[in-house]
């Protein structure tokens, strides 16, 4: 669990992470050693060719180097297999073995150069088989060296030299307050700069302005706060997620209490209301999906989409609609037409303009439902991701709205942008001039669903009859007062174990604590957890009987103290309270609990089939409440359940089932 300390700094790898990569390299080295030995034995008396003397020495020393490396790898793998994640004591000798293994890279590097020089020497006239064998050994040497360098770069932690001080700041209070405060300030600044640099590198392909720089800093502080009190390496998180998934499946397989079953038995009136909303949701989900444009259309029609779009792409750009932003060859607009089935004249405004806090949307006339539909696009670009990650809270204050509260900052700014376009540019006035008797409906999926919800709150006073359908919106969106206020005009649709609908900072903190608890308490080595987890995810079976609760372990038995476990179990993380001693216990948290908007329809699969590609899936839907989504569920479908095509498929299935039942 603690990051490995080597060369006086912490690395983003644990002492128990060398089992699987070490075993793979050990296998490669053994095959390589046997091959070189066979080559040397077969051609033992045939080194009289020009350059043969150097070849003889090269193969002999290579055999010795490979043998030494194999022994070091065997010891490394064996030691790395010992102990558990939370008990690195049996692996305390592993750094010495790593130093030995790294030392062997020096002669191996030199010998790779010697082999390359020998192969490139034109005066060598040895047998072709021998030359090819040496070329193979040289290539293998350089491949392993290059992959080792890449691995070192991946596990390098820029904060490795300072992380220990950062983590133990709340414990080591014996320092002078000014010295401690200055140290903490410096480490925080360094951590923020590191995260900001990483984000800038990931977003290097987009034009960066002042909004981007502010967003980079805000997101960097969010990541710094979240990871500041943990000493988890990536493989620890993977093991923890595996254990949580199996624990969760064990709990789901337990029979439910009678009271729990009864609470989900709705009245006929509620059922009728649900059926109506499901039919409406299935209809409006087409608009939310269409907002994604050609990427969604090609994704759902991979073999025929380009052919179907070809006629529209080659046609002239329509002039009946007000279109802004880039849409080369009419790909986006052509896809929207195909998905919605509308005509050119039905579109009032289409915006493909995309920047941070400014996302695409379109306004269209839906004659079937007699509605003016505002469809907001979900996450599809780096700019959208930055909008998602701007997760600070800000106040939403509106006139004549009593239930003011906290909202997601980035999504609120995106809603403000669309609000200004709709009102200030007269887009809605134009739409209601054409169809004054129509109602206003706002829809969106994912980021679009969250933006549509906040936009609906902003427009509610001007359009009291408006409705909003938010498909898979982010969980950390509205404070409790605003979430209750929106139950009168917003319907959220969530499928299965959708991750995004449960994604909020408090839920992420809860997931972090659950991972640390279950990992710290597990008595199995990490490689066994990961291997068993991979088998379980791919082939299924019964969940492993890993311990799931802390059972008063003896901390004195641990050779190396855990830096993350006690801090997470005893005190709240910096995401809730400031690290400084001066922070008051009664001060408001930086990330308060935020909830899903409106009334919530939760769609789940009837059968617990583990087949990811199963096409014959039956769904059930019921009204739910926001507390059901107060914890992140681990599942192979936690991502796929969020995808717009899966949401549309589930809604269509339920709508068709209701239609067939009505006809019967």
Image: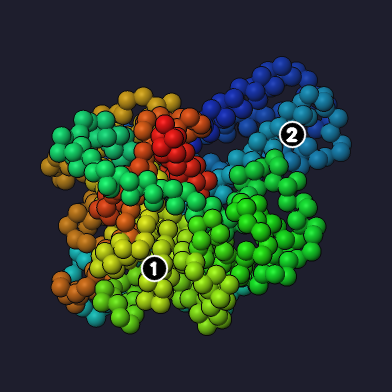
* Residue 258 image offset from top left, x and y in percent: 15, 34
Q: Quadrant of residue 97?
A: top left
Q: Quadrant of residue 159?
A: bottom left
Nearest the eye: 652 or 473 = 652
Nearest the eye: 584 or 508 = 508
* Residue 303 image offset from top left, x and y in percent: 70, 40
Mark 2 Cα shell of 10 Å, populated few (<14), some (14-19), many (≥20): some
Q: Where is the C terminus found, in terms of image quarters?
A: top left
Query: Against 172, is 19 above or below?
Result: above
Image side of residue 592 versus residue 135, left or right: left
Mark carried by residue 478:
none
Nearest the eye: 111 or 615 = 615
The structure residue drawn at horizontal position 28% and vertical position 55%, both measured from the top left corner, is 626
- Badge 1 is on which residue? 465
Can residue 366 be seen from the camera position used here? yes
- Badge 2 is on which residue? 135
Can residue 90 be seen from the camera position used here? no
Query: Against 133, is 417 above or below?
Result: below
CA distance for labels 1 and 2: 76 Å
* Residue 647 image offset from top left, x and y in percent: 47, 46
Mark nearest the camera among 1 and 2 is 1
Nearer-N-terminus badge (1/2): 2
The structure residue drawn at horizontal position 63% and vertical position 32%, both measured from the top left corner, is 62
How does the figure colour the protein chain or chains? Answer: rainbow
Element type at mark 2 = helix
The structure residue drawn at horizontal position 24% and vertical position 35%, both measured from the top left corner, is 251
């Amino acid at each position: 669990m603690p990051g490995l300390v080597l060369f006086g700094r912490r690395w983003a790898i644990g002492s128990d992470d060398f089992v699987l990569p070490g075993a793979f390299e050990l296998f490669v080295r053994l095959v390589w050693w046997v091959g070189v030995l066979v080559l040397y034995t077969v051609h033992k008396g045939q080194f009289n060719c020009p350059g043969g003397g150097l070849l003889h020495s090269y193969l002999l020393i290579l055999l010795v180097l490979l043998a030494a490396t194999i022994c070091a790898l065997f010891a490394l793998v064996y030691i790395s297999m010992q102990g558990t994640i939370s008990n690195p004591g049996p692996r305390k000798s592993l750094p010495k073995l790593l130093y030995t293994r790294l030392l062997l890279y020096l002669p191996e590097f030199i010998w790779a150069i010697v082999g390359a020089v020998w192969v490139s020497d034109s005066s060598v006239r040895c047998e072709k088989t021998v030359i090819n064998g040496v070329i193979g050994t040289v290539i293998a040497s350089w491949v392993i060296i290059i992959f080792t360098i890449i691995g070192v770069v991946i596990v390098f932690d820029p904060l490795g030299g300072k992380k220990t001080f950062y983590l133990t700041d709340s414990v080591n209070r014996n320092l002078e307050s000014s010295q401690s405060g200055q140290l903490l300030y410096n480490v925080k600044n360094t951590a923020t700069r590191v995260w900001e640099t990483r984000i800038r590198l990931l977003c290097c392909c987009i034009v960066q302005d002042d909004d981007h720089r502010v967003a980079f800093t805000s997101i960097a502080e969010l990541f710094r706060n979240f990871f500041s009190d943990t000493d988890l390496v990536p493989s620890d998180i993977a093991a923890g997620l595996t254990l949580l998934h199996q624990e969760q499946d064990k709990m789901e397989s337990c029979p439910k209490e009678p009271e729990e079953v009864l609470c989900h038995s709705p009245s006929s009136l509620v059922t009728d209301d649900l059926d109506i909303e499901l039919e409406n949701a299935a209809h409006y989900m087409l608009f939310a999906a269409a907002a994604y444009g050609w990427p969604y259309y090609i994704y759902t029609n991979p073999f025929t989409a380009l052919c179907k779009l070809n006629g529209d792409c080659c046609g002239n750009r329509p002039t009946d609609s007000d279109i802004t932003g880039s849409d080369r060859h009419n790909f986006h607009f052509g896809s929207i037409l195909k998905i919605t089935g509308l005509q050119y004249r039905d579109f009032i405004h289409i915006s493909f303009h995309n920047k941070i806090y400014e996302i695409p949307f379109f306004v269209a006339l839906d004659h079937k439902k007699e509605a003016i539909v505002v469809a907001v696009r979900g996450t599809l670009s780096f700019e959208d991701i930055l909008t998602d990650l701007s997760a600070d809270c800000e106040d939403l204050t509106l006139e004549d709205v009593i239930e003011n509260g906290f909202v997601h900052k980035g999504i609120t700014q995106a809603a403000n942008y669309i609000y200004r376009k709709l009102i200030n540019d007269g887009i809605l006035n134009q739409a209601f001039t054409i169809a004054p008797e129509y109602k206003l409906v706002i829809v969106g999926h994912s980021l679009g669903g969250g933006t549509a919800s906040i936009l609906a709150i902003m427009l509610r006073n001007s359009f009291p009859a408006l409705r909003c359908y938010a498909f898979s919106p982010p969980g950390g969106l509205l404070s409790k007062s605003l979430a209750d206020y929106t139950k009168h005009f917003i319907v959220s649709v969530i499928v299965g174990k959708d991750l995004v609908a449960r994604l909020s900072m408090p839920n992420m903190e809860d997931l972090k604590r659950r991972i640390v608890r279950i990992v710290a308490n597990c008595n199995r080595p990490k490689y066994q957890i990961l291997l068993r987890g991979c088998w379980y995810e791919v082939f299924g079976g019964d969940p492993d009987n890993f311990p799931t609760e802390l059972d008063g372990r003896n901390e004195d038995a641990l050779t190396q103290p855990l830096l993350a476990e006690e801090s997470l179990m005893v005190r709240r993380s910096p995401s809730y309270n400031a690290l400084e001693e001066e922070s008051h216990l009664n001060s408001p948290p930086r990330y308060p609990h935020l909830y899903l908007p409106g009334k919530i329809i939760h769609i789940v699969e009837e059968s617990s089939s583990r087949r990811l590609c199963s096409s014959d899936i039956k769904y059930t839907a019921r009204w739910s409440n926001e507390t059901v989504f107060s914890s992140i569920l681990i599942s192979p479908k936690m991502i796929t359940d969020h995808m717009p095509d899966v949401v549309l498929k589930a809604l269509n299935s339920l709508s068709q089932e209701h239609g067939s039942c009505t006809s019967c």
